[in-house]
Image (cartoon, rainbow, N blue to C red):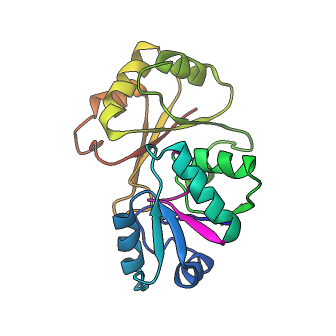
Amino acid sequence: MLSFIPTPIWNKEDITLRALRLLKEVSIFFCEDTRTTIKLFRMYDIEYRTKKLYSITSFTSEQKILEYVRLMKDNHCWVLSEAWTPWLSDPWKELVRQCREHWVDFTFLPWANALIPCVVASPWDTSKFSFLWFVPRKKWRQTFLQQALQSALPVYMYESVHRLEKLLKELVTLDCNKTVFIWKELTKLYEWYIQWSAQDLLDKIDTQWLVVKWEFVIWLN
């Protein structure tokens, strides 16, 4: 049996009582970086030296993952994310695929994430919306943005701090006539959002209005 435990997005209080209980009770964990996981245990004053921590990354071989899957068949194991929800991004997709292929049961705990708070906070009708995940770095990027701009629904996406300015320039070039809403540092002490046209936001880059730092949730409407 394999279960997935989501962890907070920077704010240590955004964790469920159920997750905290399991962090204390369970002895076998899979994670991306064991050092980060040890910091997580320390954050909640949980003893970690008696626990077995296994690392799975995007570079872990398929053969090694298969070994872990066999371990999961005989033991109740848990996956811990680096931050927020496991499975939404690598390397957990491959692990889920292997579990399905080898009939290993798995379940997910409810989680903290960046998307849902933004949907709830949107000032327009979000009974239907489109979530496009991260904007592609290179391949299909223009097609991705054109589809987002043509959508009749509110569109939500994630973008890295390193490519925010590039994204705004591309939206201006594509004659974006939608309102662009940017939410940064979600759940952190300096959580902050701004709403403007793509051109206005581009003009505000690296000013007090739009400091390019951390990760961003972008939505268009």
| Relative height, residue 207 to residue 8 (above, below) | above
- In the rendered picture of this protein, how many numbered marks are placed on residues? 0
In the rendered view, does 201 fall on the left or right side of 106? Answer: left
- Residue 69 placement (x, y as % from top left): 63, 57
- Residue 151 in view (yes/no): yes
Q: Residue at x 75, y 61 (%)?
A: 105
| Relative height, residue 16 to residue 155 (above, below) | below
Of residues 178 and 160, the one nearer the viewer is 160
Bounds of the magenta segment: 75-90
- Chief secondary structure of the magenta portion: loop
In the rendered view, does 106 fall on the left or right side of 111? Answer: right
Task: Name the image quarter holding the N terminus.
Answer: bottom right
Q: Residue at x 36, y 79 (%)?
A: 42
| Relative height, residue 3 to residue 65 (above, below) | below
Of residues 29 and 9, the one nearer the viewer is 29
Q: Residue at x 48, y 65 (%)?
A: 8
Of residues 23 and 113, the one nearer the viewer is 23
In the rendered view, does 31 fall on the left or right side of 120? Answer: left
